[in-house]
Image (cartoon, rainbow, N blue to C red):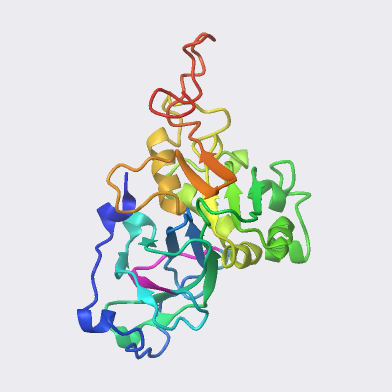
Amino acid sequence: MNTLRLSATALFLLSALAADSTVFSYGPAPPVANLQGELAGEPTSESVILQSRLTVPKRNADGDAPGTEGTACFEIADNPQLKNARRTPILQATAENDYIIKSKVRGLKPGTTYYYRVVIGPDLGWERMQVGAVRQFRTLVGDQPGPVSFAVVTGMNYARFMQGPADDGQGGVEGEDRRLGFPAFETIRKLKPDFFISTGDSVYYDIPLRGSAKTPDAMRRKWREVFLQPRAMELFSEVPTYWEKDDHDTRFDDCDVTGDRKPSLADGIRIFKEQVPVVDPAEPAPKTYRTHRVSNDLQIWLLEGRDYRSPNAMTDGPKKRSGGRNNWLG
């Protein structure tokens, strides 16, 4: 399912506005913000997917950032001043897509650092729109030679980090780490990798057991817990990302495609595509298995090990698959 295509209406600027990136006259701060920051995902040598989520201006008492309706677009350029910036179409953020807006930007240059920012507002009145902070990412060099560095992570178990190894809320992290989030994010940021890969279990819908996520709203909250960490926002403001999902961020531990235990497989597939910049929002039936040529020395394959797998109860043998005939793992 392409959530943005179904729930967000692209509203294009008048050609006079699109021709000049200096025409905006930004007014007072609107009652809309993007407290989760931004994500740049799926960089190639000529494209990237930019994403943000519109929220209320201030977190609530339990630290969450409720979403809010509004409009947004992105400005992107090859300089930090965003001179002669391109603009993506204006999108409407709605509850149906968790107030997330994302756009795939094409026509970029290989091996180039790009700078971008989100422009948000409560409606289509440009005098009420505000620009966000300038972020950056680097495109892949493609079939050209060049050094490449990247960070690969898995198992970002936020509940265990904050609450400890048991479900009693004891033994979790303390001090500044509790406020700032995963220390590893800061370590990765200081290493300045070209890109970041999460190979799955970025969230755990089934942990803690007494607070497992079984509905789309609860599943989305798990993603917000990760992305609202200050260290996460700092890292992803500088480093583009790739995302895979595994059992815990599809449904639950060792899940397959069978059974009516919540969350459903359909919800697991839909929420993953919604919450991270993985697939082109304009594609009617996007696939989450894909490959990218990083350089003439490196190509990466990002697999899909959950959507097509054989039932766990199936007798072991050559026909039992972790992928399926429609997926490379098959």
Relative height, residue 71 to residue 146 (above, below) = below
Relative height, residue 126 to residue 115 (above, below) = below
Looking at the image, can residue 195 be seen? Answer: yes
Residue situated in front as seen by the camera: 265 or 153: 153
Q: Quadrant of residue 55?
A: bottom left
Q: Position of residue 159 (x, y in %)?
A: 65, 48
* Magenta highlight range: 64-76
Is residue 32 located in the magenta-colored stretch of the structure?
A: no
Q: Quadrant of residue 89?
A: bottom left
Q: Residue furthest front?
A: 145
Is residue 68 located in the magenta-colored stretch of the structure?
A: yes
Q: Write the residue at 44% across / 81% down.
A: 131
Q: Write the residue at 47% across / 40% down.
A: 214
On the rendered structure, is 268 left or right of 23? right
Q: Count all numbered tags in the image, as a single digit.
A: 0
Q: Position of residue 11 (x, y in %)?
A: 23, 69
Q: Write the residue at 61% across / 58% down.
A: 194
Residue situated in front as seen by the camera: 156 or 32: 156
Relative height, residue 112 to residue 147 (above, below) = below
Q: Position of residue 256 (x, y in %)?
A: 48, 26
Q: In the rendered image, which quarter contains the N terminus? A: top left
Q: Quadrant of residue 63?
A: bottom right
Looking at the image, can residue 36 be seen? Answer: no
Q: Position of residue 91 (x, y in %)?
A: 30, 67
